[in-house]
Amino acid sequence: MWPLLGLFRFDLYGVIAYWYALIVLFVFFLMARRLINSPFGLALRGIRENAVRMRAIGAESRPHIRKIYTISAVMAGVAGAVLTQTTETVSLGVLDFQRSADILVILILGGTGRLYGGLIGAIIYMIARDWFSGVNPQYWYFPIGVLLIAVVLFLPNGILGGIAQLINTERGQRWFGWATSPPSWLRRPRRERNGSRHPRPRQELRLAHCRQEHPDRAAARRALRADRAERRRQDHADQPDDRHAAAGRRPDSARRRGHHRARPEERVRRGLVRTFQINSLFPHLTPLEAVTLTICERERIARTWWRPTSDYRAAVDEAYAVLEQLMLGPVCTRETRELPYGQQRLLEIALALATKPKVLLLDEPAAGVPREESSELFSAITSLSQDITILFIEHDMELVFRLASRIIVMVGGRILLEGTPQEISADPRVREVYLGGAHG
């Protein structure tokens, strides 16, 4: 083989080949690190977390996926070329099942979703394979399998993920004296020890009510399921097709009329934005990351992979301003899954506002929000800009009369009455159907 760059000849011991492969690995590692910390890398994390929500913030996921597939193919091609150049052989053995299984084991050991996971996993796997094969050359796969099962059971995020989780605890910080941290533009405080799962108060209250009527626990559960099914049936009957159209699901009636032919991301760019009745967020992203991602998609800079996100300070500052407007500034660097349910509802609105909508569709914004947290949600909705037309679907009549300037009453999927809050409350049909005949 020709000497490398005309100066370095590949020797029998593979020293030149080793350093050559190490340099190529280091160069591509720097490229991957730059890509992950770029707006494009943030968009890829969003696609992995919630592809449906990405379309709801105006992101075109397919171009991102095609680009990362192309980049991955280039990296795999370079790796194959380096292997061929250093070994002077081309073999189909690199495509067999064992090589694929080795790569899968490496990723599981190191931890998927982490840049250093592959490197750590490869080091651990190579050391374990050499040591176990030296102890028992015939059955060395058995201890490798035991190690893999132990990692899957006790370290589901891989060895690197387990170390990071340990370091981010108080005990780990006492042991190691330091903690892992996100990029410089986004510092996340230590997770609170009181747990992150927020109770579902409405379901608990309904279950308690069902238990009062049905002392038997099984009967109460059945009554709760029946109540939930009836509520879903009423929601589908009372709520218009436009809510589904904004989400990209076109009902049969919309197809017959020929409307809603635009894709969800196109509607968002035109100014029609919605929130979800059931939270559809990015669990492992922080609110600041999620809103920054939305702004990057809106400004068409999410395709950039050669510049870090920290270079786009205007987008980060705008994201923080949106979160401050909705009283989410103090928790903007916590992961979304750690936030209380009421703050997650506010984040739903924040993601919608970051797209700069002309028409904002709110699908039961107070659904599942406890009373002690609903005041913040209501004040945030009332403080929205008057330039935004807000259409919200809600069954809470107190909230409707408090926020709405014009009301459309629907019964069985048909419009019963349209008018101001005063006209609606004075109409006897509305009082009979929704407010109760005794309402004054």
Image: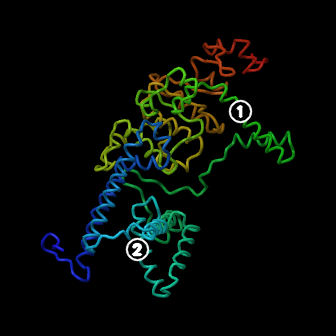
Kind of residue sitting beneath label 1: Arg
Q: Quadrant of the C terminus?
A: top right
x 39%, y 68%: residue: 119
Rendering coords of residue 214 (x, y %): 86, 42
Q: Going 41% across and 27% down the picture, which residue do you hit?
A: 270
Q: Nearer the viewer, residue 104 or 237?
A: 104
Q: Secondary structure at mark 2?
A: helix
The picture places residue 299, in percent across and down from the top left corner, at 34, 36
In x, y percent, where is residue 145? 54, 74
- The amino acid pointed to by label 2 is Ile
Q: 298 above or below 79?
A: above
Q: Does 337 sit above or below residue 172?
A: above
Q: Position of residue 237 (x, y in %)?
A: 67, 26
> In terms of secondary structure, where does tag 1 sit?
helix
Q: CA distance from mark 2 to mark 1?
A: 55 Å
Q: Which residue is mark 1?
A: 231
**Front in this rendered view, residue 120 or 330:** 120
Is residue 214 rendered to the left or right of residue 315?
Answer: right
Q: Quadrant of residue 107?
A: bottom left
Crowd tier of the residue under label 1, counting other residues whose Cα lies within 10 Å: few below 14, some 14–19, many 20 or above: few
Residue positioned most to the bottom: 135
Above or below, 345 against 334 in this view is above
Taking the image as shown, residue 141 lies to the left or right of residue 271, namely right
Label 2 neighbour load within 10 Å: few <14, some 14-19, many 20+: some
**Residue to which mark 2 is pinned:** 123
As drawn, the residue found furthest toward the right would be: 215
Say which mark, if any, is on residue 39: none
Q: Nearer the viewer, residue 55 or 368?
A: 55
